[in-house]
Image (cartoon, grey):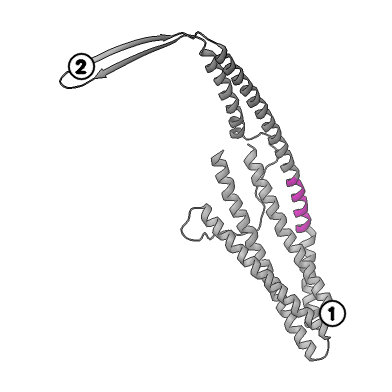
């Protein structure tokens, strides 16, 4: 279980690194558009084409985007430090592959984690073995011992001891046996409950993975293309003074929401895939 948890934690650190890396890249690209909007708005205001309100909207948009970029960069630093720590590396870890993609997860198998089941059952076996130990104390106990004494000037004072102890009163031992039986019943019920919860957890994770996978497919086949087309059209119209400042800001924010939602969806999918891998197989 510890080994599986360590592997899962390393993969979580990588998934978080991947998420913050692409979020930072995406906001950097959007920040360039915000800077273009700010310069264009300032120029058009000087030429008298827009009002002071519209110019202030461009300034606010640029300032907001810079703050988002700063927050994303700081979050990426935290993710990089976490990845370095989990890899026990003295130098920052720089992955060779930073492509934004889902983890390969197979949802065909429904076998629960063998190590988790073994752990739950071991608690039951331990408690049942304890019942046998307490029962054995009703029988006589034999003991054999050897003593060796080496004291100057006499040496070789060795002796063997053989003993037998017979229980005479059984009330206290009866209570111990009953308590051991209760503990065994409790351990058995707890193991059954843990297995039931594990089954339920795996079922929920499979449902989440299907949900995220369907959302990701929607983004990749439709929403991302629409966002890119929206940005290209708005940028082109802004350069030719064919769109309002408010329309451009609205288009930029809508595209930003779509791209950010896609990156977060990939991250949520990968986290669920890691949990599914941890509790399955």
For the stretch drawn in magenta, the main secondary structure is helix
In the image, is 5 to the left or to the right of 203? left
Task: Give the numbered dot on residue 156.
Answer: 2
Q: Are marks 2 and 1 in contact (CB under 8 Å)?
A: no
* Residue drawn at point x = 72 percent, y = 80 percent: 36
Q: Position of residue 126 (x, y in %)?
A: 56, 24
Specify the segment rendered in magenta: 208-219
Callout 2 secondary element: loop
In terms of image quadrants, where is residue 189?
top right
Q: Is residue 95 visible?
A: no
Label 1 Cα crowd, 10 Å radius (few <14 / some 14-19 / many 20+):
some
Q: Which residue does the image show at 66% across and 29% down from the upper left?
A: 190
The spot of residue 148 in percent (x, y) is 26, 18
SS assignment at label 1 = loop
Find disc 1 in the rendering and name its residue: 244
Horizontally, residue 46 falls left or right of residue 103, namely right
Quarter-of-image position of residue 280: top right
Residue 5 percent coordinates (x, y): 57, 43
| Quarter of the image where the N terminus is located | top right
């Amino acid at each position: 279980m510890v080994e599986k948890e360590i592997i899962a934690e390393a993969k979580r650190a990588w998934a978080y690194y991947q998420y913050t890396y692409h979020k930072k890249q995406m906001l950097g690209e959007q920040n360039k558009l915000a800077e273009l909007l700010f310069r264009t708005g300032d120029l058009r205001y000087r030429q008298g084409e827009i009002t002071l309100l519209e110019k202030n909207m461009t300034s606010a948009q640029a300032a907001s985007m810079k703050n988002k970029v700063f927050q994303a960069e700081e979050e990426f630093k935290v993710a990089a430090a976490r990845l370095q720590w989990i890899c026990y590396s003295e130098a920052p870890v720089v992955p060779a592959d930073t492509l934004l993609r889902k983890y390969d997860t197979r949802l065909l198998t429904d076998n629960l984690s063998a190590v988790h089941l073994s752990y739950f059952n071991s608690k039951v076996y331990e408690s049942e073995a304890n019942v046998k130990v307490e029962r054995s104390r009703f029988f006589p106990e034999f003991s054999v011992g050897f003593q060796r004494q080496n004291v100057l000037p006499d040496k070789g004072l060795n002796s063997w001891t053989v003993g037998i102890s017979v229980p005479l009163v059984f009330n206290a031992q009866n209570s111990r046996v009953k308590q051991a039986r209760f503990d065994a019943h409790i351990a058995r019920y707890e193991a059954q409950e843990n297995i039931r919860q594990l089954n339920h957890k795996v079922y929920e994770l499979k449902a989440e993975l299907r949900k995220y996978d369907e959302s990701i497919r929607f983004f990749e086949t439709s929403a991302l293309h629409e966002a890119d087309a929206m940005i290209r059209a708005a940028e082109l119209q802004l350069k030719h003074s064919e769109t309002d400042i408010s329309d451009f800001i609205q288009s930029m924010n809508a595209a930003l929401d779509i791209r950010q939602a896609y990156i977060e969806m990939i991250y949520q999918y990968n986290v669920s895939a890691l949990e599914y891998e941890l509790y399955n197989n």
